[in-house]
Image: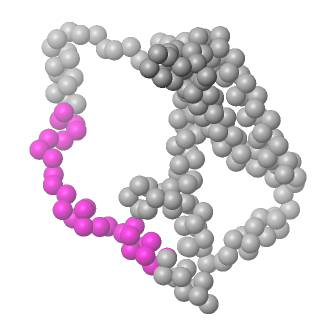
Amino acid sequence: MAALALRGLGRRCLLARLGPGPALHQAVPMATTAREEMRRFWERNERSGRPLSPHVSIYKWSLPMAMSITHRGTGVALSLGVSLSPGVSPGVSLFSVAALLLPEPFPHYLAQVGGLSLGPALVCSAKFLLALPFCYHTWNGLRHLVRASGTCRGLWGQQAWDLGKGLRLPQVTQSGLLVLALTLLSSAGLAAL
């Protein structure tokens, strides 16, 4: 009974907090709009005759570049699963919000998914896809930490990456391939559980 009361109280507090707050009512309009700023920027650029800056499309994609972008993407995706926004409350996960807002407890929904009679290949594939971003972000983060805190210290105690150790392209590519292999193996292992 206390759990239901706490759930109802949490639901009301969360819904009240997600509603429009006083900050939206006190917003001051800006002097210029973004469209006006962009128009001024392009007019100034055309008058000066400067060429446009090169875009990402002119670069040849490499493994470290793709892994860096993927690391940032998985970090954003994982943070959305862990925290709604810094303004709501640190540590409020989407799963806890779902537990508050959904009418039935979690085992009920788990039983419903089990009752769909999905084949084991589909269930294992879904588990693999859920584990993949977590494993990749973890292994790539550990790769960065190992590079950043190597045993090689400089004159003033700088970390290894401050000294540029392990940052040559062949070493970065080798450690990247190791991260990808460990990601696939650990994701498959987690999916097999």
Residue 60, above or below 16: above
Q: Residue at x 22, y 38 (%)?
A: 34
Q: Is residue 35 a member of the stretch shown in magenta?
A: yes
Q: Position of residue 182 (x, y in %)?
A: 75, 32
What residue is rendered at 16% in x and 19% in y? 44
* Residue at x-position 41% and y-position 17%: 55
**How far from the left and from the top, in percent, is residue 108?**
73, 74
Q: Please report the bounds of the magenta region as a residue range.
A: 11-37
Q: Residue at x 45, y 78 (%)?
A: 12
Quarter of the N terminus within the rendering: bottom right
Q: Is residue 61 magenta?
A: no
Q: Is residue 51 left or right of residue 121?
A: left
| Percent coordinates x, y for residue 180 in the rendering | 71, 28
- Of 145 and 69, the residue lying toward us: 145
Question: Is 87 situated left or right of 152 in this image?
Answer: left
Taking 20 as reference, is 109 left or right? right
- Name above or below for residue 86 compared with residue 189: below
Query: In the figure, residue 42 lies in which quadrant?
Result: top left
Picture coordinates of residue 116, whole percent (x, y): 81, 64
Q: Quadrant of residue 6?
A: bottom right
Q: Residue furthest right?
A: 120
